[in-house]
Image (spheres, rainbow, N blue to C red):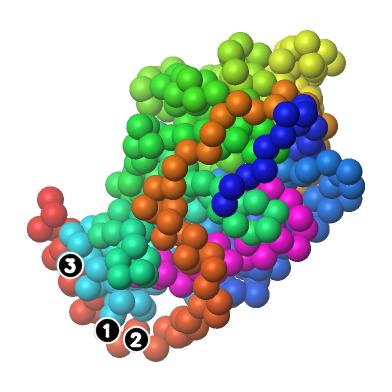
C-alpha cells in the first residue's frame, strides 16, 4: 500500500502490550485468535480517539502455533518431548520435508505446518488491525520466505526466519523485517531458525513514525541500529520474548562470558538507542511473560525516548533510576537483588512455588510527536509481494488431525535419527 504522508507534524500514540502466554493459547485456531484478540482488547481503553495508534505486540507470538491441534501432547510437559511427539505424529507431512530439503526434524516440523500456520497468523493480525483501526506491529513469528510463481505465493525451500510483519489500519501490508542476530535457543540447537540478512533491513515511513524493526537481540547490535539510523528510522520497534528469569544473569554472543543482570543488559537496547541515537527518537519494546511448558519468559515492557522527553527518573529493577523512560511496566516485586533473584526462580516453570507463573501483564502508552517524514516507502520485496496475496486470501486453515499415526512412531524415530546422522 501507499501510506499517506502529510507536511504536518505527526502526532500519534504508541502502545506496547505485555501479555501472558501458555501452551493452551495455541492448541486451536479459536484459542490463538482469542489470545491475540485479548491483547487488542486490553489495548482498547488506551487507544487515542483523535490520533493514529501504533500497537506493538511481542516476539515469537506465532512460534507456539506448532502446538496447533496438539492438546493431547501437552501432558509431556517439556518443549523437547512435545516437539518429538509432534514430529512422530505428523510424520507423513514432516518427513518428506526433512529428506527433500535436508533440514533438521524441528525445522521440518515447523515447515510442514507453515502454510496453514502462516495463513492463520497473518489473517488473525489483519482482521484485528482492521477491527481496531490501528497500525499493528504483529510481533514476530517463524515464517518461510515466499516468492510469486504463476501468480501464487510459493514457499522457498528450507528457510524459516523470525519475521515481523507491519500492517496498516485497513489490514494491508506495510513491510516485513527478519531477525538478523539469533540467540542460541533460536539456532540449530533450539528451534533452528534461519538468520535474516542485514542488507535487507529497511525503514518504513508511516503516519506513526519512520518505523524500523530490531527484533529482540537485534536491538542490542550496533550493525542493526546503525543501518536503521542510516535509513532515517525515527521509531524503533523491539518485539521481545526473553526466555529467562528477568532477575537472572545474562550472557550472549559475541561475549557469553560477560555475565550481567538481565535488566542491566536490557539498557543496552532500546533505551540506549533512543538516548544516544541520531535519528531514532522513540522506541517501543513489549515483552511477553509466562511459562510455556518448561520454558519461562519474563521482562519489563517499556517505551523510551530522549532524556529531554522523559525527564522522570525510573528504570528496570536492579538498575539505578535514570531519564529516558516514557512508560515502563513495574516488575512483580522490588527489593534487594538477592531477594529479586529468588522471586525470579519462584516464578519459573515447574518451580512448585505458590508464585509459579504469577507474572505481571500490562499495557503501556505514550503520546509522541515527530516532524513530517521525508522518506519514500521502500520498494516491495518478492517476499512482501507474496505476503500481500496471502493477506488477501479468504478461507480457514486446514484442520490438523489428532495423533492417529502413532503406529508409525517407531519408523519415524528411526528415520529421524538416520537423517540426523547423515547430516553430521
Task: Tell me, yes or no, whether the two marked residues, 1 and 2, touch with CB atoms within 8 Å.
Answer: yes
The quadrant holding residue 247 is: top right
Q: Residue furthest front?
A: 7
Left or right of 106: which side holds 9?
right
Look at the image and give the residue range highlighted in magenta: 111-140
Nearest the viewer among 411 and 35 is 35
Q: Which of marks 3 and 2 is nearer the N terminus?
A: 3
Where is residue 124 shown, x and y percent of the image?
Answer: 62, 65
Q: Where is residue 179 in the image (x, y as percent from the top left)?
A: 44, 40
Looking at the picture, tell me which residue is in the foreground, 87 or 157. 157
Can you see residue 306? yes
Q: CA separation, marks 3 and 1? A: 17 Å
Q: Residue at x 60, y 57 (%)?
A: 172
Mark 2 neighbour density, 10 Å: few (under 14) some (14–19) many (20 or more): few
308 lies above or below 374: above
Q: Is residue 26 left or right of residue 228?
A: right
Q: Mark 1 to mark 2: distance in Å? A: 6 Å
Picture residue at 67% right of the left edge, 43% below the top: 4
The residue at which mark 2 appears reads as: 405
| 363 in relation to 123, above or below | above
Specify the label residue 99 is tagged with: 3
Please identify the residue farthest to the left as the structure is shown: 422
Q: Nearer the viewer, mark 3 or mark 1?
A: 3
Residue at 84 percent of width and 47 percent of height: 47
Q: Is the magenta stretch mostly helix, strand or loop?
A: helix
Which residue occupies 74% across, 12% down? 307
Amino acid at each position: 500500500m501507499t501510506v499517506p504522508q502529510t507536511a504536518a507534524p505527526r502526532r500519534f500514540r504508541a502502545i506496547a502490550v505485555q501479555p501472558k502466554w501458555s501452551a493452551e493459547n495455541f492448541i486451536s485456531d479459536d484459542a490463538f485468535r482469542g489470545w491475540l484478540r485479548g491483547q487488542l482488547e486490553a489495548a482498547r481503553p488506551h487507544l487515542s480517539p483523535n490520533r493514529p495508534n501504533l500497537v506493538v505486540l511481542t516476539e515469537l507470538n506465532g512460534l507456539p502455533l506448532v502446538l496447533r491441534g496438539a492438546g493431547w501432547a501437552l501432558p509431556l510437559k517439556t518443549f523437547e518431548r512435545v516437539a518429538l511427539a509432534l514430529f512422530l505424529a505428523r510424520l507423513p507431512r514432516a518427513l518428506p520435508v526433512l529428506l527433500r530439503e535436508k533440514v533438521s526434524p524441528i525445522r521440518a516440523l515447523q515447515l510442514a505446518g507453515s502454510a496453514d500456520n502462516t495463513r492463520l497468523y497473518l489473517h488473525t493480525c489483519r482482521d484485528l488491525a482492521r477491527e481496531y483501526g490501528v497500525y499493528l506491529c504483529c510481533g514476530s513469528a517463524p515464517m518461510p520466505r515466499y516468492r510469486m510463481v504463476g501468480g501464487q505465493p510459493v514457499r522457498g525451500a528450507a528457510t524459516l526466519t523470525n519475521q515481523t510483519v507491519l500492517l496498516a489500519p485497513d489490514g494491508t501490508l506495510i513491510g516485513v523485517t527478519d531477525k538478523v542476530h539469533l540467540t542460541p535457543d533460536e539456532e540449530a540447537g533450539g528451534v533452528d531458525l534461519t538468520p535474516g540478512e542485514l542488507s535487507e533491513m529497511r525503514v518504513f515511513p508511516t503516519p506513526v513514525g519512520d518505523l524500523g524493526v530490531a527484533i529482540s537481540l537485534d536491538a542490542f547490535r550496533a550493525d542493526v541500529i546503525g543501518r536503521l539510523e542510516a535509513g532515517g528510522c525515527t521509531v524503533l520497534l523491539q518485539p521481545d520474548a526473553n526466555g529467562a528469569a528477568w532477575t537472572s544473569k545474562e550472557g550472549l554472543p559475541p561475549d557469553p562470558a560477560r555475565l550481567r543482570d538481565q535488566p542491566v543488559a536490557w539498557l543496552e537496547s532500546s533505551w540506549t538507542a533512543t538516548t544516544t541515537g541520531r535519528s531514532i527518537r522513540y522506541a517501543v519494546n513489549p515483552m511477553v511473560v509466562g511459562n510455556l511448558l518448561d520454558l519461562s519468559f519474563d521482562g519489563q515492557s517499556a517505551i523510551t525516548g530522549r532524556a529531554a522527553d522523559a525527564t522522570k527518573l525510573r528504570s528496570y529493577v536492579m538498575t539505578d533510576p535514570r531519564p529516558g523512560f516514557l512508560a515502563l511496566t513495574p516488575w512483580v516485586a522490588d527489593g534487594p537483588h538477592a531477594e529479586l533473584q529468588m522471586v525470579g526462580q519462584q516464578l519459573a516453570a515447574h518451580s512448585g512455588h505458590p508464585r509459579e507463573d504469577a507474572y505481571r501483564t500490562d499495557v503501556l502508552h505514550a503520546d509522541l510527536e515527530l516532524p513530517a517524514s521525508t522518506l519514500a516507502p521502500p520498494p516491495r520485496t518478492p517476499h512482501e509481494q507474496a505476503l500481500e496475496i496471502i493477506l488477501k486470501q479468504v478461507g480457514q486453515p486446514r484442520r490438523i488431525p489428532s495423533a492417529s499415526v502413532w503406529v508409525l512412531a517407531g519408523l519415524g524415530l528411526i528415520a529421524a535419527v538416520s537423517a540426523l546422522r547423515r547430516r553430521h
